[in-house]
Image: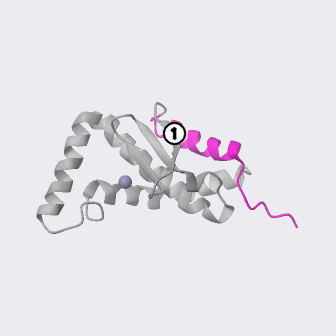
């Protein structure tokens, strides 16, 4: 039996662009970057930065990968909804609010919590769709 251990670059790109198009944030550019985190949405530039740790994805990482992309897409949708400048202010205010309350600026951040929830709630249907399409 042949087990596909890695997802092809083409299929990885297809997963990302399908998600960006579905959530109507097609203008988001994707960039690979060497960084500590797995992903980051750069609000100023409208760029989804993906860690080079995701240059190749194992099939075992696909769930985590889809959740990560959905999480960042949620930030992109917020930026689109409020306008990126306003959203950036809102986000910074939230960070300051958490710090002032002795909480974690990210873990307790309402925008981070909402983005993570969105990823967790939506990954399953995408996982099944992409699997059915033979992308992994
Ligand atoms: Zn986030």
Which of 15 and 89 lies nearest the eye of the viewer?
A: 89
Instruction: Write the residue at 85% across / 63% down.
Output: 2
Residue picked out by circle 1: 30
Q: Residues within 10 Å of mark 1 (few under 14, many from 20)?
A: some
Q: Residue at x 52, y 40 (%)?
A: 31
Stretch in magenta: 1-25
Residue 116 rendering spot, x and y as whole percentages: 39, 59
Seen from this angle, which residue lies furthest front?
34
Residue 30, position as x, y percentages in the image: 51, 39
Looking at the image, which residue is at 32% across and 57% down? 112
Q: Nearer the viewer, residue 79 or 132?
A: 79
Above or below: residue 55 compared with residue 78? below
Of the pair 87 and 36, the residue shown nearer to us: 36
Q: Is residue 4 left or right of residue 42?
A: right
Would residue 50 appear left or right of 7 to someone viewing this image?
left
Position of residue 113 measured from the top left corner of the image (x, y, whole percent): 32, 60
Name the quadrant containing residue 136.
bottom right
């Amino acid at each position: 039996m042949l087990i596909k251990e890695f997802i092809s670059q083409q299929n990885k790109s297809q997963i990302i662009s399908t998600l960006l198009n579905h959530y109507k944030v097609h203008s988001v550019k994707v960039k690979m970057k060497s960084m500590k985190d797995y992903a980051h949405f750069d609000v100023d530039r409208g760029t989804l930065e993906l860690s080079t740790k995701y240059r190749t994805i194992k099939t075992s990482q696909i769930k985590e990968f889809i959740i990560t992309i959905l999480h960042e897409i949620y930030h992109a949708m917020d930026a689109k909804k409020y306008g990126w400048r306003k959203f950036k202010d809102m986000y910074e205010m939230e960070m300051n609010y958490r710090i002032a309350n002795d909480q974690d600026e990210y873990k307790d951040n309402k925008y981070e919590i909402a983005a993570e929830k969105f990823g967790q709630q939506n990954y399953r249907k995408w996982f099944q769709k992409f699997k059915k399409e033979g992308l992994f």
